[in-house]
Image (tube, rainbow, N blue to C red):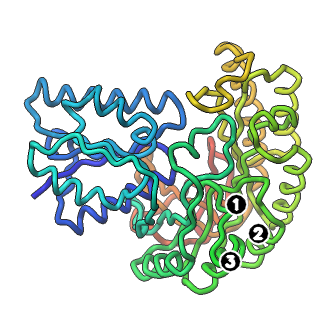
Amino acid sequence: MIKFFIENYGCQMNSSETDSLRSIFFDHGFIEVADPPLADIAVINTCSIRKTAEDRIEGRLGYYRGLRDKKGSKVRVVFMGCMAQNRGKEIGEKYSDVVAAVWGTYNKGGVAELIDSLKDPGNNNAFSLAQESYEFMNSSPRERLKFKSFVQISHGCNNFCSYCIVPMVRGREVYRKSGEIIDNISSLVDGGVLEVTLLGQNVNSYSDSGLDFPGLLDKISTVTGIKRLTFLTSHPKDLSKNLTEVIRAHDNILKTVHLPLQSANDRILKLMNRKYTFDQYLEKISWIKEIKDVTISTDIITGFPSESGEEFQDTLDAMKNIMFDEAFMYYYNPRPGTPASSITPQLGMAAKKHRLAELISVQQKIMSERLASFTGFRTSVLMESPSRKDPGELIGRTHNGLMVFMKGDKSLAGKIMNVEILKPSGTGLKAKIL
């Protein structure tokens, strides 16, 4: 019987695929172990979005080499995902004593058969990096939160932002059939899933025989019986007024939207190949803000090549004016082979870190103000898990995506409760169950 250990890095898409792989492995009779030295096969589902992610993952390969060299472990690694697609041949050769197979971003459902073939210790150096025909795996409940699930509706990206490696490693957009999506979600609901997050690099470009993303969202919210429905990620150039109207029309669609800005300066946006202007972005924000009690989050990149101080200030000013509830902020990290990596001048690390610190400082103040504005707010919360700091306290998410902490027994995890917000607490809110 094959014993496996699986570790995941990167985005929600990777998390979804890892959850699906785990279910497929169980169906094949594999046994999951909690400690890598006990495994026959270690599966690493990798990320390549930033160099820091790749460095961390390569450090894990060194760890597995150490297990074999110093502790006599026979564990072998299946190296898969975006970093495998990007640097698979190089990694396979560099760690040939550890890596038994390199598997890219396509045909991940075939990994179980691959692992079966690795029962023979002589079977090594398997490569699967072709991007020919993508097959979606059925989505499964999340590993630790069985009442939630990530469900893929598309794979790949057609946007080719100048800084992004995703189109290279995941290929062009492929859309899952709407019937398959609905059947998958209906099955998850029957199994006790309460919340589904639809996933795609750009959900707004979804299309299936004339059905667009607002139509898909409307259909899922109506026919599957799902209690809570949300999605990631939207691209500003494709977000439509119709989408915001669908969100407003359905109580089971969470009132939270993630809309990456990246920069508020039009010259930088053009260099990024984002295909919208800041004014066009603001128009989309105005549509979203028509949704009652909505929260809005974003992504920001600072220190993009040739970004001036004045252009950076445009982004700071935009954050102050829009007042995002949450922002994921990064300094520019060049990825080899992307157009942005050859734009000059490239800013120094000190300047990039200084600008990032300014962004974080501004956003922290905005977040504190936004959180305080919800004091006295009554809403529903999906109870998720006990707090690590206080076992008598539960963590959950409101119907508009805010993190809340409240006193409650752990038996309430996986239930939807009504609460009242009491006060801000760090990056979340204190609440009481009604």
Q: Amino acid at mark 2?
A: Leu
**Helix, strand or loop under label 1:** strand
What residue do we see at 86% from left, 27% from top?
Answer: 311
What residue do we see at 42% from left, 34% from top?
Answer: 87
What residue do we see at 77% from left, 60% from top?
Answer: 239
Q: CA distance from mark 2 to mark 1?
A: 12 Å
Task: Provide residue 237's location: percent of width, then percent of height.
Answer: 79, 54
Q: Which mark is residue 211?
A: 3
Front of the two marks 3 and 1: 3
How crowded pointer 2 is (Cα within 10 Å; few <14, some 14-19, many 20+) is rated as many
Q: Which mark is residue 407?
A: none
Q: CA distance from mark 3 to mark 1?
A: 23 Å
Query: To which residue does mark 1 refer?
Result: 256
Q: In this orientation, does residue 234 appear? A: yes
From the viewer's perspective, is residue 363 above or below residue 323?
A: above
Are dots 2 and 1 in contact, CB under 8 Å? Answer: no
Q: Pick out the residue farthest to the bottom.
A: 223
Going from N to C along the chain, the mark reached first, 3 or 2, is 3
How crowded pointer 1 is (Cα within 10 Å; few <14, some 14-19, many 20+) is rated as many
Task: Provide residue 307's location: percent of width, then percent of height.
Answer: 80, 23
